[in-house]
Amino acid sequence: MSVVDEIKARIDIVDLVSESVKLRRSGKSYSGFCPFHANSRTPAFVVFPESGTWRCFGQCNEGGDVFGYVMKKEGWDFPTALKSLADRTGIEIQPLTQEARQEGEEYERLRALLEEAVTFYRHQLFQTPAGQAALDYLHKREIKDAIIESFGLGYAPLAWEAALSHFKSKGYSPEELLQAGMATERDSGGIYDRFRNRIMFPIRDGLGHMVGFGARILDPNDVPKFLNSPQTALFDKGRLLYGLDQARKAIRAQDQVVIVEGYLDVIALHQGGFANTVSPMGTALTEDQLRMLKRYTRRIVLALDADAAGEKATLRGLEIARTAMDRGDEMAFDARGLLRHEARLQADLRVTTLPPGMDPDEVVNRDPAEWGKILEVARPVVVHVMETLAAGSDLDDPKAKGEIAAKVLQLIEDVPDPVERDAYRQRLARLLKVDERSLSGPAPVSARPKRQGRTPARRVEKAGPAPAVNPSRMLEAYCLGLLTRHPDALYQLDRALQQAGLSRMIPQDFENTDYQVVFRLIQQALEQDEMEPQPYLISQAPETLQSLVQDLLAQPSQEEPLYDRLIEDLVRSVMRLRLNHVYDSLNQLRFLQEDLQEQGDLRAVPYQNLILQHAQIRDRLDRALRQPVYHA
């Protein structure tokens, strides 16, 4: 992941914009008055948390990501905005060296190897006699073939060098197999397959990139029961959540995420219609994982089995205040860790418990409605603690009451909001049947958790730019690639656009801030006369964008059309790009209008003017696309 992508992943755009704009939730987005022009009638400024972008549908008619917002708000250039946001997130920016660029290329090759491994293990599962036992096991767990295909499950054969021999024949070196976590070194020398006779679970990051595998035993005598890829340049279990790539849309749509312990639990719940489910990598949660989830929702439910949520586990979670919930070999209940994360992330963390002796997949397979009811009764962390402790105690015993009060009051003191603290004290008083005034004093100083120092900035490993994730982004990359390889084509493009009655191309035609910066550099390269445009572009691009510029300059895998055809293709691509943006704007404006009308808000009327304006632009672009392209 590049520095730019890492910053975007860590910053919640709603939080950033809310520092200077009062936002109101409208379905999946947030709206408010644009901070960049005078307007007090129509809240035409919209923030989209899922994509991490913003757009003004009014006078500005601009949009972008967190970088674009900060650059426009502060009047900064891209390097200044990059430094500011890197400081804000604690990310250290390292110069992009030749070694870092080569490292990025190596990462892409490792991802390609892992993608081929998914195909290899899938073939072993469905097409070999040895894989039948694994397939039978999955069917016994009521996992259907469609969901097996969707999650890319496979089987690692019972052999020491099956995968090793296969990928060597594909041109991969033993060193690459080690780096990808597919092989293990022998003490006596040489390497062998890391995964043998196991069901294979491909693990992807939130963007869908392959990073590693989880593997479950078939033979009950094998150990360990679950085996993950080792820590590699791509696989960092503390910063991954299984199933997030498939759960993102459902999490946003339901405004809730549910965290369970097992891979098969995630798959069974997705199959049962609960696609807002993810799982950590066989360990307890980390703040990085919760921060990723907060990009999609603030409502987080931790689904624990009876043992992990019981009295003993609760008491262990109250013993010491840990800096992160990342110790131990299984998902555990750490009350203080959860509360600190909840406060820092301004999230709503809740806990729910499963029927004794049952896993989530057993519950949902028995009755999907039962799983829904379990989620409905999820409780805040403090409430879960007080009710769990009370359930295992004699509440007629004054000493038992005192012990519960001492433990829970320590936890209540960790809650930053004074209203919440009072509400919890009232609830505890009712539970223990004591006068609330006896609980109003602060917890003993010695019992309070120590304040933790600021976590030092962590160096971020560099990787190549993330691939396009939607059609508009792909079209933006295509247009910018043509202009980067043929800067002079911008003159022809602008003339053709003006002849069609359209405005010249501007940086705001790109929603991606990186692309806006590169496009401005192309304009500057054409305006100066000290060197050729492409060398100028390479010399002036910020270090963090050097990899992107090199990728854009590289010749595409398919031969580009001749120059005249290239210009025509470029003109029509820009028109289609603008048309995509207009359709997106029209859809959002209509949604905002309907949202206000349902609430009886008279401010919905001004949206009609904006809708008409965008409809006129749409019609003009439609006509231009139907006409032949003229260029000199």
Image (cartoon, grey):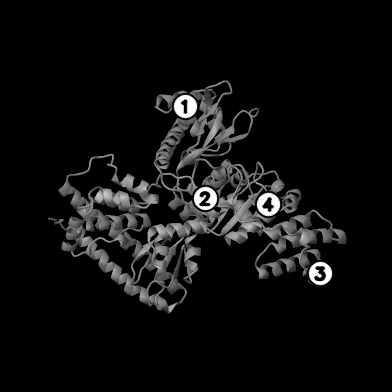
**Disc 3 from disc 2: Cα separation:** 45 Å
Q: Is residue 10 above or below residue 552?
A: below
**Disc 1 from disc 3: Cα separation:** 67 Å
| Residue type, mark 2 in image | Ala
Q: Earlier in the sequence, mark 3 or mark 2?
A: 2
Residue 340 location, x and y as percent?
A: 64, 58
Mark 1: give few (<14), some (14-19) or many (20+) Cα within 10 Å: many
**Which residue, as the protein is rendered here, is positioned at the far top?**
188
In front: 436, or 490? 490
The residue to which callout 3 is attached is 438
Give SS at disc 3. Answer: helix
The residue to which callout 4 is attached is 322
Q: Which of marks 1 and 3 is nearer the N terminus?
A: 1
Residue 128 location, x and y as percent?
A: 48, 25
Q: Residue 174 carries which label?
A: 1
| Residue type, mark 1 in image | Pro
Q: Earlier in the sequence, mark 2 or mark 1?
A: 1
**Left or right side of 150 for 383:** right
**Disc 4 from disc 3: Cα separation:** 29 Å
**Left or right side of 393 for 95:** left
Q: Do the residues labelled 4 and 3 touch (CB within 8 Å)?
A: no
Q: Which residue is drawn at 49% across and 34% down?
A: 180
**Disc 2 from disc 4: Cα separation:** 31 Å
Q: Do the residues labelled 2 and 1 touch (CB within 8 Å)?
A: no
Q: Classify the position of the C terminus by image quarter.
A: bottom left
| Residue type, mark 3 in image | Ser
**Disc 2 from disc 1: Cα separation:** 38 Å
